[in-house]
Amino acid sequence: METVTALTPAQLQSLVQIATQLNLTVSWDYNHQNIKQLLAQYAPDVELGLWWPSPDGFVSVTDGAGDIFGGFVNSHQLETVQQDASFREFPDVDGAWMSGIVANRQTFGLAFVTGGKGEIAQAALKMILPQLGLARLSYALTEEVAKRTSTDKLTGLWNRQYFNERFREECERLVRSKETGAVAIIGLDNFAALSKTMPADEVNGLYSQVGQTVRQVIRQTDWAVRWDNNELLFYFPSTPADAALEVLKRFGKRLLASHAILEPLVGLSSTVETTSPRALIQLATRRLDLARKDGNRRVICYATPAHGLQFWRGDGQ
């Protein structure tokens, strides 16, 4: 590490203390707190921010990082900026640096650092980066294993039990971050009625088709769940209800194009209305029931702060 030669003995001792006490895991709440405490104790002038893909977004590991790096984050796209994963100077802030968080030739996010006397901020980030990358890789592998053991075999979507475990944690995060999310319960009522008279192989094939259509329409950050035999649940993180509505419109159109009996009815709720996991799902379920009672085709029942309860009808009625 070329910057080490510019450090004083006291600064070098601080780096040693950080290195020996840094213990990152697959729990990122713990990781952020671990780094924050070590910097506060051994490099109190250093400010560190981490920028992860949605739904995590930018994390101010130290209290002042948001003010320093927030403007840059708000005016750029992570996918574009992280294409350059090299360690380099941060634009517009003297004495600040940025780097991709890399492991196994994958770039998982970006890190920003500034502050401290001499080169200690730069040296501290270079020392922390390898653990950040390995911890994020471990987290990604853990998530992949969990998904593979927690998915519905026919659709390839998450099963209900796995979603329930994850969604409680997600709602706690939403309360802290004050982000907006949306939940949709989707009923395939025509399919439910007609599947009783269809051969099992054909029914299973249609379930598989539903899963394929879901993956073609929703974003990588969205959650899709086989909620019941003939119901799906979508969770859209960092997404207001009107944006989720557009995704649901596309999904309904593509699903119906794949087979005439795959006609969805949808109830949509938003964290603007409540952040309780149970209340969000209950609200979406009640709106699905209202969509069913509407009597038209491809109905989406939702609400907006300005206009209250509304119905979107795919047949143009």
Image (cartoon, rainbow, N blue to C red):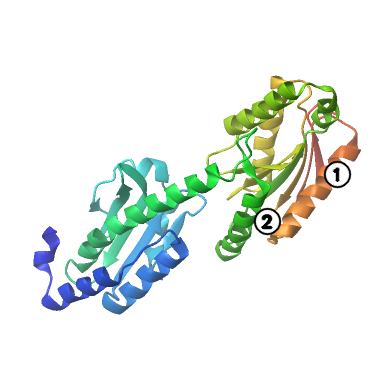
Residue at the spot x=31%, y=68% of the render? 22
Characterize the local packing of mark 2: few (<14), some (14-19) or many (20 or more) Cα atoms within 10 angstroms. many
Above or below residue 8? Residue 110 is above
Residue positioned most to the front: 200
Viewer-proximal residue, 54 or 225?
Answer: 225
Residue at the spot x=68%, y=24% of the render? 205
| Tag 1 and tag 2, C-beta contact below 8 Å | no
Real-space Cα separation, disc 1 to disc 2, in angstroms? 20 Å
Above or below residue 252? Residue 18 is below
Q: Is residue 190 visible?
A: yes
Callout 1 amino acid? Asp
Q: Which mark is residue 271?
A: 2
Q: Considering the image in quadrants, where does the N terminus appear?
A: bottom left
Q: Is residue 309 visible?
A: no
Callout 2 amino acid? Thr
Where does the image place residue 257, in percent across and percent down from the top left? 70, 20
Q: Is residue 268 left or right of residue 37?
A: right
Instruction: Choose the circle earlier in sequence order: 1 or 2.
Output: 2
As helix, strand or loop, the secondary structure at mark 2 comes to loop
Above or below residue 39? Residue 26 is above
* Disc number lying in front (1 or 2): 1
Where does the image place residue 237, in percent across and percent down from the top left? 59, 49
As helix, strand or loop, the secondary structure at mark 1 comes to helix
Q: Is residue 9 left or right of residue 53?
A: left
Q: Which residue is mark 1?
A: 289
Residue at the spot x=13%, y=62% of the render? 3
Residue at the spot x=25%, y=68% of the render? 19
Tell me where residue 37 sits by quadrant.
bottom left
Characterize the local packing of mark 1: few (<14), some (14-19) or many (20 or more) Cα atoms within 10 angstroms. some
Where does the image place residue 263, in percent across and percent down from the top left? 78, 28
